[in-house]
Amino acid sequence: MAVTVDPLATMECPRPDHVCASLADQFCSPNDLASPSTLALALGANLPSAVGPPFDTLRAVRPVLEQIIQEWLEEGLGLPSMDGRASGDLRYRWSPLFETDPVGGPADQPAYLNAVVVVDGALLEGMKPCESLALALLEQLLALEKRFGRDRQASPLRWGPRCLDLDLLAWGGLHVQHQVLTLPHPRLIERSFVVVPLAAALTVHAEPPRRISPHADWPE
């Protein structure tokens, strides 16, 4: 069970003919409450980096990641650089940090710290989601991982411990099937360490759903 540790403030998806049940489907479903260009990324760490333990790593990564997204958008839209200054046309909705047990990999690896950031706003809406731009962002994410000590090619162990893990979860209704990237993330709804922070980020500026009391006709 996830435990809150410390809060930190080329194809369009077709309109479904049925109710969308999964979070991945909801990213693909146009509605009045979510931008078609909403971007979601996941962060995690369970080994120390050059800046310290996982908490210090994720705290240090946060502003750098925002700057990378800003610069990626500016380049994609052909806008002049804002020199890293925050843009009022972008909103970053950060989840709290969660501590979770490892899924797969070596049995003796430490617990992870995980978070999700959801990005939307007018600036992001100006850029149509496409595979080439998604791959360009992924390249930036992998370079950021390497800056904090993780080299995926040098350490190819699947689900092994890492000092930083950055994953692109979804970008609007974009579907990508590429050798190095699948969107929406193929295991998005199978991982509580992604779903729980994602839900928290999506409701950070909204009233979360209210759980009702257990009912005899609705066993839990």
Image: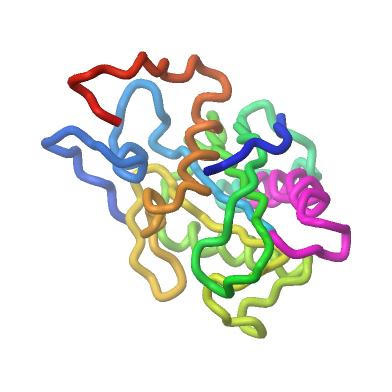
Q: Which residue is drawn at 77% across and 44% down?
A: 63
Q: Can residue 126 be seen in this view?
A: no
Position of residue 209 measured from the top left corner of the image (x, y, whole percent): 41, 19
Q: Nearer the viewer, residue 130 or 115?
A: 115
Q: Which residue is drawn at 65% across and 55% down?
A: 112
Magenta residues, start to end: 46-72
Q: Is residue 55 magenta?
A: yes
Q: Is residue 120 left or right of residue 85?
A: left
Position of residue 206 measured from the top left corner of the image (x, y, whole percent): 51, 17
Position of residue 40 measured from the top left corner of the image (x, y, whole percent): 51, 44
Quadrant location of residue 213?
Answer: top left
Residue farthest toward the bottom in the current orientation of the protein: 154
Q: Does the magenta stretch include residue 125?
A: no
The rendered magenta stretch, by its main secondary structure, is classed as helix
Q: Is residue 196 left or right of residue 80?
A: left
Q: Can residue 109 be seen in this view?
A: yes
Position of residue 201 measured from the top left corner of the image (x, y, whole percent): 55, 32
Q: Residue at x 68, y 77 (%)?
A: 151
- Look at the picture and state if 82 lies above or below 132: above
Q: Nearer the viewer, residue 102 or 73?
A: 102
